[in-house]
Amino acid sequence: MIIATAGHVDHGKTLLVHALTGIETDRLEEEKERGLTIDLGFAYIDDELGGRLGFVDVPGHIKFINNMLAGVGAIDFALLVIAADDGPMPQTVEHLAILNQLGISNGAIALTKIDRVEPERIKQVKTEILALLSGTSLADIEIFPLSSVTREGVEDLKTVLCLTAAEMDTQSTHGFFRLAIDRCFSVKGSGLVVTGSVFSGIVHEGDQLYLMPMGESVRVRGIHTQNQQAAIANAGDRCAINLAAHNLAREDISRGNWLTSNSHHQATNRFDVSIQNLGNTIRHWTPVHVHTAANHITGRIATLENTSITPGERGLVQIVTAEAINLCTGDTVILRDQGADRTIAGGKVLDPYSPKRGRAKPERIEYLRALNGAKPDDALNVMLEHARLGLTLNQAMNSLNLRPEELENQLKLLPVTVLGETVIISTQLDRLNETLLSDLDTWHKENPQAKGLSSNQVASFLPRGCPFASLIIDGLVAKEELFMDGNTLARPGYSARLSDHTQQVWQNVEPILLKDLTKPPVLHELAKQLSLEPKQLEKSLKECLQSGLLIRPVPNRYFTPQGMALLHGMLKEAAKDGDFTVKEYRDVSGIGRNLCIEILEYFDRQGITQRLGDKRKILKQGA
């Protein structure tokens, strides 16, 4: 069980840990000289029931609150230390507020220095403490009057800690392994070592992990949990990991970095949080210090529901940070004011990847409220129900910290369809299909002379940025709700209709083009043969193009689809040795050099051929 001290400066936290463990946690020379805890200290003992207790001794001075926050991000038990002579003090109140925002409910009050006061004072301070705890997550915890000097009451507290550790449930190992780094140092003969609290998952010696947000790959050379060598580490452990990595130095790692088994986890600088205001009115774009796990960065609060959040009120906000950090849904965020003088709010991350635009749209607020009210196991369903275009599998895994097999198991229980790397609620997909087909039907009615549309044009009937548009189209073609003719899509049974005038022109044009499929006359020659003005003829031929009767690979000539198929097929004959020149294609096709070049350039644009210097190679075989 991991226990963190909390409380005002000089209330005896470090002395109490020493009384419980026999270990001095102040390791810095400055701490020893000043008698003041500055950074995190650690102590571990085997308890009397066969378990192991780990203590994180945090600083109580207001100047080092960021270090305190780094130490209490993932603990099992809070030991709030209050001196009997002083009673609750400013940092007592702030530390309690932080523990409350972190949702820590297991804990105890160590009422220290009782050897300095009269019994009446102890009763008075107990009353003050009960009033202070009322309404918090630690409201029902026990108060232990004690003295670290005389040791009165110390063994009673130690016994309760041992019993609590024995009763505590084993931490879950679900999710990717995540360790919040709070220290990094070098050990002679071993190399780099990082320490921190394991927030989720499990790690084994020899595993590959990733240092975030840099994405640097590292290997686990060795593991210590609760200051003992171990083969594995689980969620809830205090852990030290010996890292092996190429070109990674101690100065490359800092407090606030993460170790994770998720190689695809993305850092973010915009995330949505449901916060509770602990102080004065919070206004839109208030500058703040942001603490999450061992991270400490600056940022701003963008209020989403109103322009401000009054004291004691809860509200939805987007936090915009100065630098990107790694977060998951459910992580706790503590916000302190611009001067880092006091804690002003705290809450849980709802969406670690919130948008830059449209953050306060009604549908976005509705989504965040649904997430805020959802149980952890229902979060994926809520996310999918509000994702009109679905979620990528990486989005779901990164946001909810789900391993692939865990995500797959959850998706099996939901009415969803997986399209490539995207998962979408099946009813949402049905609506997208219906919208596309309805819009295409309308387009056919408005453009009766056109044969159909290209795949890109049909995809434009779907919402902008739809990542699986091509898969939707392929699915509709497979179900015969769309018909594909070459590169053109249409509804089954639809056929283009030419206007009466164009129909008469086509009856005269078609026989001329069929005389020589690969060498049609240029536009002016064709117009002369038909005794028509070139512009007038071009207008009618454009309608024939739209209906699919003609293809215009070069500016001044029109080919029938049969003619283009012949020219396409001749590519293979020209490329006997794998590639071919213009001359070799000209000799096979029998068309002039200039037209030959134009036709080949058309095939290049269509992705049928690729030019490589003076030669070309075939990318797509002709039908």
Image: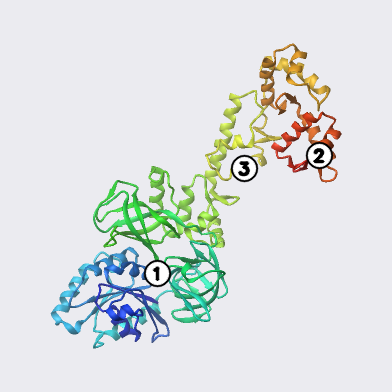
x, y percentage for residue 146?
24, 83
Residue 408, located in which quarter of the rendered image?
bottom right
* Labelled disc at residue 470: 3
Amino acid type, mark 3 = Ser
Alpha carbon separation for disc pair 2 and 1: 69 Å
**Residue nearest the viewer, comparing 51 with 66:** 66
Taking depth in this image into account, of 613 and 394 the one nearest to the observer is 613
Q: Circle 1 is placed at which residue position?
A: 74
Of the 4 image quadrants, the one containing the C terminus is: top right
Please, what secondary structure does the residue beneath circle 3 have?
helix
Q: Please tell me whether residue 524 is drawn above or below residue 559 in the rendered image.
A: above
In this view, which residue lies farthest toward the top?
A: 531
Image point (65%, 42%), residue name:
474
* Tag 1 secondary structure: loop
Question: Residue placed at 58% from the left, 34% from the top?
Answer: 437
Q: Nearer the viewer, mark 3 or mark 2?
A: 2
Disc sitting over residue 581 in the figure: 2
Q: Which structural element holds mark 2? A: strand
Label total for image: 3
Residue type highlighted by circle 2: Thr
Q: Please tell me which of labels 1 and 3 falls first in the chain.
A: 1
